[in-house]
Image (cartoon, rainbow, N blue to C red):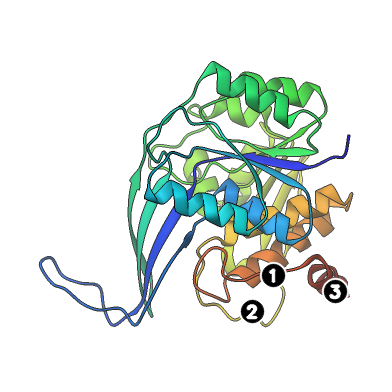
């Protein structure tokens, strides 16, 4: 069986109003210079980046029969993604986000659809993910399927995202199961309730085999087996919008892991993909091919 990469997550649909002169006050109406509607980040964002790099992927998500589900379906087809619907509903079960972007920063308003998990969906997930090189986990569901996949030799990648009450206790099961955890610096500090990144990374590496902390314009810091190293981002990156940078980083790392590269080279690929993402507005606006990434890796390692 040919190996592939897989991931489970909700579809995120972003409605982006950009180049706003300011954020509106309550009761006001203002006009944006630009507008776009596109798929957002999360596991599906990473998988789309991986597909653009030419790797075989399988996406598992939650689609209904409504307007947003139809849009998401067409986008997944456009990107050539093999997708499987785990939802037992006709309604959209993803996330819709309105992003308001000024020259200074962004503000978000999001709506999250209901969760639709079932034992049948878990069985389907386990069957179709069997043989995967790695799976991007969805927290809070399918723990038994992930456990069985890990016993079969599949690697498990975990990106929890940020939530206001995240803690090691809350996510202990997922952290213990994951092979690699990908927090950003704020998430690493929040989940450990520690004040320095070094202490947070060391603590997390006691729970997870490898912790890769993304540090925005400062690159990434890796913690593993009581050691750590820092890898700066590629020079000359033109920053426009940070949306989706973490998902692009994960895709770059997963690409390197799939290709059998060293940890250093996997992180370098992640840094390159993250840096490419931030040069345009939107999670998936910037696109990178495998040949472009390999050429940039050669320059990076010099």
* Disc number placed over residue 295 in the picture, else none: 3
Q: Are marks 3 and 1 in contact (CB under 8 Å)?
A: no
Picture coordinates of residue 172 (x, y %)?
Answer: 56, 26
Residue behind mark 2: 237
> Where is the C terminus found, in terms of image quarters?
bottom right
Is any part of residue 229 visible from this angle? no
Q: Label 1, secondary structure: give it.
A: loop
* Disc number placed over residue 233 in the picture, else none: 1
Picture coordinates of residue 272 (x, y %)?
Answer: 72, 68
Please tell me which residue is depicted at 44% across the width and 46% down the height of the picture: 69
Q: Disc 2 or 3, which lies upstream in sequence? A: 2
Residue closest to the eye, 30 or 220: 30
Picture coordinates of residue 131 (x, y %)?
Answer: 81, 31
Picture coordinates of residue 147 (x, y %)?
Answer: 69, 21
In three-dimensional space, the C-alpha distance between marks 2 and 3, rounded to whole angstroms, equals 16 Å
> Where is the N terminus found, in terms of image quarters?
top right
- Using residue 120 as the reference point, say whether residue 103 is left or right of it: left
- Crowding at dot 2, Cα within 10 Å, few <14 / some 14-19 / many 20+, comes out as some
Q: Disc 3 or 1, which lies upstream in sequence? A: 1
Q: Nearer the viewer, mark 2 or mark 1?
A: 2
Residue closest to the eye, 29 or 161: 29
Please tell me which residue is depicted at 65% across the width and 72% down the height of the picture: 276
Residue closest to the eye, 289 or 86: 86
């Amino acid at each position: 069986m040919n190996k592939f990469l897989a991931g489970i997550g909700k579809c995120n649909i972003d409605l982006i109003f950009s180049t706003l002169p300011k954020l509106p006050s309550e009761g006001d109406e203002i006009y944006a210079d630009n507008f776009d509607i596109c798929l957002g980040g999360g596991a599906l964002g990473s998988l789309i980046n991986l597909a653009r790099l030419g790797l075989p992927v399988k996406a598992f998500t939650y689609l209904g029969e409504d307007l947003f589900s139809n849009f998401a379906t067409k986008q997944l087809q456009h990107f050539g993604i093999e997708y499987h619907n785990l939802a037992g509903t006709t309604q959209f079960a993803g996330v819709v986000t309105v992003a308001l972007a000024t020259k200074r920063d962004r503000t978000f308003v999001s709506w999250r659809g209901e969760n639709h998990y079932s034992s049948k969906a878990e069985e389907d997930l386990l069957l179709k993910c069997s043989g995967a090189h790695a799976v991007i986990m969805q927290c809070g569901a399918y723990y038994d399927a992930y456990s069985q996949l890990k016993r079969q030799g599949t690697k498990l990648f975990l990106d929890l995202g940020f939530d206001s009450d995240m803690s090691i206790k809350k996510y202990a099961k997922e952290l213990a199961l994951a092979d690699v955890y990908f927090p950003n610096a704020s998430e690493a500090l929040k989940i450990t309730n520690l004040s320095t990144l070094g202490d947070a990374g060391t603590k997390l590496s006691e729970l997870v085999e490898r912790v890769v902390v993304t540090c925005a314009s400062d690159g990434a810091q890796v913690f593993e087996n009581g050691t750590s190293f820092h890898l700066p981002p590629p020079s000359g990156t033109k920053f426009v919008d940070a949306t989706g940078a973490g998902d692009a980083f994960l895709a770059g790392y997963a690409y390197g892991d799939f290709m059998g590269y060293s940890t250093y080279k996997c992180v370098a690929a992640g840094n390159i993909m993250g840096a490419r993402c931030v040069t345009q507005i939107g999670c998936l606006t910037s696109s990178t091919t495998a040949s472009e990434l390999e050429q940039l890796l050669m320059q990076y390692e010099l």
